[in-house]
Structure formats: C-alpha cells, structure tokens
Amino acid sequence: MDAVISSLLRAGRGIVGNADQGGRRQITLLAAEVWEALMRDLESSLPAAARRANLLIRGTDLRDSRGRILRIGACRVRIFGETKPCEQIDDALPGLKDAMWARWKGGAFGEVLDDGQIFVVDVVEWMP
C-alpha cells in the first residue's frame, strides 16, 4: 500500500486506479486508533499499511456502523459491513487475525456515493 495525500473517488466504483472497482466493497477503512491498540497489545510496530485497507482514518469509530453514511471531505461512503481479516494477515504478524476478528477491529467496507477528491486533511464524520 502506498501513502498518498489525496485520492479521487468515483460514485459506484471506488478509488480511481484501485484494482477493485464496483460491487459492495468499493472502499475499505481502518481506524488508526484501533490499529495502534492492536500493535500495543501484540507488542509490535507493524505499519498500518500491512492491513491493506484503502483509507486509514482517525477520530471516527467504525464499530457497528453497518448502514451508516460517513462523510470524508466532500464525499460520502455508505458502510455495508465489517472487514474481517483473512489468514494472510498472520503472515505479517502471527496472531493478528485473531486479535482483529472481534468488534470491527479489521475495519469496515462500503460504497462510494459521490464523485470527488479526498485529502489527508479532510474531516471524517458520520452523517446524521
């Protein structure tokens, strides 16, 4: 995963240039605070990029967010569900899959509702 300062989103497709386009899993999100807690618990410093989520967000709890709409800058994402980790994550850090399994610790996935560009500095918040 490559860190970037901005990405272009396409409604109904996902991140422009991403391999996975369309479907229900157009974008994946991971909460930085959850990742940091996992690394403390597992006594590791593995970078969040190892999770391979599309967006690392801060200050927004993704737990139990199925059906909610998240605004990222000028774009909205409808959360469809929890991203469960697969066994490949244990190749990066043994025990990580089990640690991520419960309570949405693997993040969330959803569909992009708006075309637009998002930036690292954008506000991330739940829509009412």
Image (spheres, helix red, strand yellow):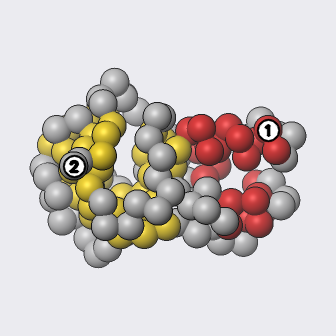
Is residue 65 visible from the viewing direction of this image?
Answer: yes
Q: Which residue is mark 2?
A: 128
Relative to 84, is 1 above or below?
Answer: above
Is residue 88 visible from the viewing direction of this image?
Answer: no
Q: Amino acid at mark 2?
A: Pro
Q: Amino acid at mark 1?
A: Arg
Residue 38 appears at what percent x and percent y?
Answer: 73, 46
- Between 2 and 119, the one lying in front of the other is 119
Query: Local crowd at mark 2 within 10 Å, few (<14), some, or many (≥20)?
Result: few
Q: Which residue is mark 1?
A: 40
Q: Which residue is painted at 42% across and 69% down in the image?
A: 81
Could you say which disc has been placed on residue 107 in the image?
Answer: none
Q: Which residue is painted at 62% across and 45% down in the image?
A: 34
- Between 89 and 78, the one lying in front of the other is 78
Residue occupying the far bottom of the picture: 23
Relative to 57, is 14 above or below?
Answer: below
Dot 1: what SS?
helix
Residue 103 appears at what percent x and percent y?
Answer: 61, 62
Residue 22 placement: quadrant: bottom left
